[in-house]
Image (tube, helix red, strand yellow):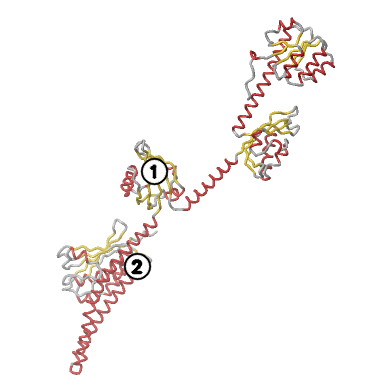
Amino acid sequence: MMTQPESNQDRRAALVAESDALVTSLAVELVRRYTPTALIAAVTAGEHFDIIVIDLPADADALNLCDTIRGHQRTPILTLLDDDDDDTLKRLSALSATDYVRRPARPAVIGYRLEQIFQLNNMRAQGEYNRHISELATEVAGIGVWDWNMQTDVVYYSAAWLASLGYQPDDIEPHFSAWFERIHPEDRERVRAALDAHIKDGTPYTVEHRVLAKDRTFAWMQARGRVVGRDAEGNPTRMVGIQRNVQKHIELEEAFRKNQERHRIISETISDYAYSYIVNADGTLKKDWSTQAFHDITGYTFQEMDENGWSRLIHPDDHGVAFARFERLLANRLDATEFRIITKSGEVRWLRDHGHPVYDEEQGRVIHIYGAAQDITERKRFEEQLQRQAAELSARNEELDAFAYTVAHDLKNPIASMMGFASLMQSYYTRMSADKVMEYLDLIMESGYKLKDIINALLMLAGVSKMGAVELNELDMQIIVGDTLKRLNGMIEEASATIITPDEWPSAVGYAPWIEEVWANYISNALKYGGQPPRVEIGASTESNGMVRFCVKDNGGGLTPDEQSRVFTPFTRLNQAKIEGHGLGLSIVQRIVHKLGGDVMVHSEGGQGCEFSFTLPAAPPSD
């Protein structure tokens, strides 16, 4: 076991001398006095001394004693000599004597020389002790030390350096080339460049590279070094450094990198985003982390969210739902809630958020919330589409029920009439006058026209329902209304009706053939259900919401509130006792106007007639 060097009080010295004066003057420094024979016996027995002082009458005897001592130990020796000629000094040097003093010598000189030898010896012992401590520390830390004599190309490798690669001292030659040849071929150029840069301009030599181990595998090593000696011309003479096996560290880094890459791929691939919030003692949230999908869905980075920044994502109409969910999580209850968010770009999206609280028993509260939110916008849109389709299908089914009843009822009368008159003519034709035959034929023709009207109305209704979007163009409403009145001219003259139209028409957009049908339905109804004689007022006005309102007002008996609520329902007839009809007209109007982006309305006050209206988008202003 290595121990600290001894102090001055622990010095062990031996004196071989015949001079009592010297013994007396140096007694304080010396422990024992020996004869040459006794000293040789002590040294041979293994007794150790910190210094040996030899003061024999003959120089030859002193040199011979030095030679004998050197055969057993390297203890510093101070020799007193009578002659310091060249031959004597050469032999003294060959025997590795530490120092000499020429006689006669004053005790102060001898004491000074002894003190210098003691200090030098202590310095060497301390250096040896420090070297052992350093080697022990590096071995414990798994750090190997190397020391490269750049003049002789000899390299010292510490035991820890060798062990880091599985080598024994005899497995690798103590030369630079032996180490360099074991570096992985792909790393040699990089290591050589790092060495040259350090030697040339002092760039720190720190490099990671692979080295061939004894088991023929390559291990990652981290090396650091420094030039510590240069000659008079500045050429490097010595470089020392350390080396540490970082193979496990590299493997962990690689595993971590692969794990991060897998995490990145999963995060960027799936539509769900995972997140983690720390719950503060006051119930506020502190952002922890989230996956890349959070940014992809919301447009925000996780860093842009403050402690409760998630609340600004929530759609205003869903704040109550989201905060109720948060309360459930703080109550340590699992939760899965659907709500809307508003992204950074202003888009509204649907999320299904699964929350998992972490409860701390010691603190008695939820301290963490983990969760995953799935973007279900497309699913919600599909569900809404299904709901619309289901509603439309339900409405269609109701229409079909009404259609079946109406068609059966409305087609029954004209067909029955036609069949009745035809049967009479078939049975009594020979006995019927020409006038009666023409009367029956006229009635059959009238019933046929009624059937034609019903069939045309049904075709129009089906066509509007099935036809997709149409191109909207600016309408010349004066021409469209004029053409409609020409179509209805016979009804107008027969009823002696008064028609009032505006002098100017606001500009709107729509599909002219359909709008003509709307006017035809509204005006014909006003003629049928109006007063005696009918008075029909046609008007138009610009609304504040970018729409244009068109209306037809009659002077008839009006509609009850219940009738107003059902007037646009397909296959519904009102005032059947007074007016025959098949109940399709207003439902066609409604579908046409809805297709064109407008709406239909009716207003009636008892006994004051009805006002039917529809709206269309206003035409954009011309440049």
Name the disc covering residue 10, or none: none
**Which amino acid type is shown beneath numbered disc 1?**
Ile
Q: Quadrant of residue 32?
A: top right
Q: Quadrant of residue 363?
A: top left
At which x and y percent is residue 451?
26, 79
128 lies left or right of 357:
right
Q: State the residue at coordinates (58%, 42%).
A: 250
Q: State the residue at coordinates (78%, 16%).
A: 65
Q: Nearer the viewer, residue 537 or 394?
A: 394
Name the disc covering residue 369, or none: 1
At which x and y percent is residue 469?
37, 66
At which x and y percent is residue 473?
37, 65
**Which comes sooner in the sequence, label 2 or label 1?**
1
532 lies left or right of 518:
left
Q: Residues within 10 Å of mark 2 (few under 14, many from 20)?
A: some
Q: Indicate the quadrant containing the N terminus: top left, top right, bottom left or bottom right.
A: top right
**Which amino acid type is shown beneath numbered disc 2?**
Tyr
When the figure is inspected, residue 448 is found, relative to residue 166, above or below; the finding is: below
Q: Nearer the viewer, mark 2 or mark 1?
A: 1
When the figure is inspected, residue 124 is found, relative to residue 156, above or below; the finding is: above
Circle 2 — which element? loop
Q: Indicate the quadrant containing the C terminus: top left, top right, bottom left or bottom right.
A: bottom left
Q: Nearer the viewer, residue 346 or 501?
A: 346
Task: Report the Cα–Cα distance between label 2 and label 1.
Answer: 57 Å
Question: Which residue was labeled with disc 2?
Answer: 511
